[in-house]
Image (cartoon, rainbow, N blue to C red):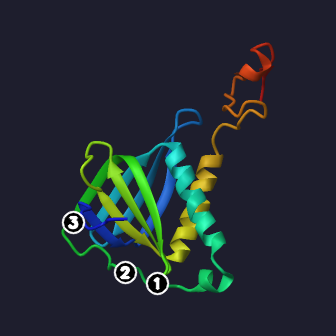
Amino acid sequence: MDIGNAKYRLGAISRCSAEAIGVPGQRTFRLLLESGAASATIWMEKEHLLQLGTYIQEIVESLSGDTQAVAGAPPEPEWSGRLVSIDFKIEKLALGHDIASNCFLVVAHDIEEQDSATVSFWLTMGQGQELSKEALKVCAAGRPPCFLCGQPINPDGHVCPRANGHSPLQL
């Protein structure tokens, strides 16, 4: 994963959280980051956040218990540049795990800029595990999926295509 051309290399993150804004069915999702004098709000689709949380969890589970317990330092220090506030919607998101530092690297690409990454940042193993739990919890707090077709069930019900629209399902 090439981070050398990222517009903002935030380095080690001091704060990272995931949240959803709005009511289920009309929520928007974002990551909130802080590193030194930099802050970033990265807007994304629910699927991006869900996959980020899932992939971090899968990486952690693939590591031995001893490796999971190693608290490594990120390869880059926190942002030491000027005060900056970054706000954008992603087109794509990449995740990597650095074995030497036992840290996660996240690279986000702005939907408006296709040439290079917009933001890169490092999470410690502990931060990655917390972000994964938080992301999965935020995503699960939405509308429940239909047990027949998997589509979300709205508060006023759901006409399931697998039931040929004849059986409206209620929560």
Q: Which of marks 2 and 3 is in front?
A: 2
Residue for point 37% across, 55% down: 108
Dot 1 surroundings within 10 Å: few (below 14), some, or many (20 or more)? few
Disc 1 on helix, strand or loop? loop
Q: Is residue 108 above or below residue 80?
A: above
Residue 100, numbered circle: 1
Disc 3 on helix, strand or loop? loop
Q: In this view, does 84 lie above or below 147?
A: below
Q: Do the residues labelled 2 and 3 touch (CB within 8 Å)?
A: no
150, 89: nearer the viewer: 150
Q: Nearer the viewer, mark 2 or mark 1?
A: 1
Q: Mark 3 points at which residue?
A: 83
The reply to whether residue 158 is in sight is yes
Residue 94: quadrant of the picture: bottom left
Q: Is 93 on the left-hand or right-hand side of 23?
A: left
Whole-Å distance between the Cαs marked 3 and 1?
Answer: 30 Å
Inspect the image, locate mark 3, and give the three-letter code of the amino acid beneath it: Leu
Residue for point 59% across, 36% down: 24
- Mark 2 or 3, nearer chain start: 2
- Mark 3 or 1, nearer chain start: 3
x and y, in percent, of residue 20 in the image: 52, 46
Q: In this view, does 131 lie above or below 165?
A: below
Residue for point 33% across, 78% down: 76
